[in-house]
Amino acid sequence: MQRNYICSEPSTSDRRPIVSRRDQLCDAGLDVLAAKGLRGLTHRAVDAAAGLPAGACSNVFRTRAALLEGLAERVFERLTPDLAELEAEAAAEPTRDQWVHLMQQLVRRVRAQPHLQLALLELRIESTRRPELVDPLTAVVRAAFDADVAFHERAGLAGGPEEIVLLHLAIGGLITDVLTLPDALPLDDVDGIIERLVDRLVFVGSAEQVGS
């Protein structure tokens, strides 16, 4: 499955009514992880959140490590656009305004599903304690980045891999602040902040492109 985390306006999983048992359990696990943290994430808690009989989660994910790996992958599946939306974005005129639009839509989408990002933050923190999580979590994050680069090239947007890295870092930090400590910094105009980030990280020094 192609994943695209930043350079798209993905659909949410709510538009995908049919899910596998594995996905059903992962979705429930992400809800538990976001609400209760790692301490509250147990196979039994996931069974209850999914509305499934006891033992359903352990049948699919034999170990806690396997469950955490499944949740890491599912986060990015939930953030994946459907093909029609992705193609529509790729076919749009590759202007500065399109860059801004893509970044603003990303943040709006994450804010509409905050539990997904909170669950991802929990997984990232846990990877510092569980070395076995580093490789699988790195793999899914890297796959998302590679998909962003591929989308960027297909869409003909300004900049390149370096600008995408910078925006990953900047937008990721913005999302973390918005979801965790929104009053710590002046974040009243999130759309405006995103616009300035795009200008400074992608179009700095190019007055013609900034004005396009």
Image: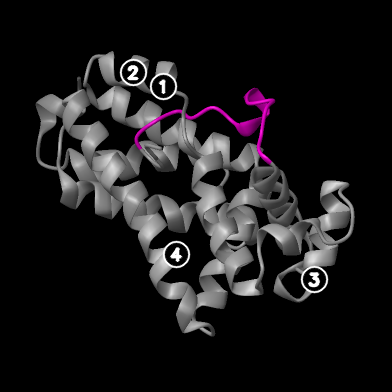
The earlier-in-sequence mark between 1 and 3 is 3
Q: Quadrant of the N terminus?
A: top left
User: What kind of element bears circle 4?
Assistant: helix
Name the residue carrying label 4: 137
User: What kind of element bears circle 2?
Assistant: helix
Up-down: is 68 above or below 79? below
Q: Which residues are magenta?
A: 7-20
**Is there a contact, CB below 8 Å, between mark 2 and mark 1?**
yes
Q: Quadrant of the C terminus?
A: top left
Whether residue 14 is in magenta: the answer is yes
Q: Measuring 75% from the left and 68% from the top, which residue is drawn there?
A: 41
CA gap, disc 1 and disc 3? 35 Å
Name the residue carrying label 2: 87
Q: Measuring 88% from the left and 60% from the top, which residue is drawn there?
A: 54
Mark 1 surroundings: few (<14), some (14-19) or many (≥20) residues within 10 A: few
Q: Position of residue 42 (x, y in %)?
A: 78, 69
- Check the image and name the residue furthest to the front: 59
**Residue 200 falls left or right of residue 29:** left
Q: Check residue 83 in the rendering and tell me which mark sits there, or answer none.
A: 1
Name the residue carrying label 3: 40
Viewer-side residue, 66 vs 103: 66
- Amino acid type of disc 3? Gly
- Amino acid type of disc 4? Leu
**Is there a contact, CB below 8 Å, between mark 2 and mark 4?**
no
Mark 3 surroundings: few (<14), some (14-19) or many (≥20) residues within 10 A: some
- Amino acid type of disc 1? Leu
| Res. 44 image quadrant | bottom right
Up-down: is 101 above or below 130? above
The earlier-in-sequence mark between 2 and 4 is 2
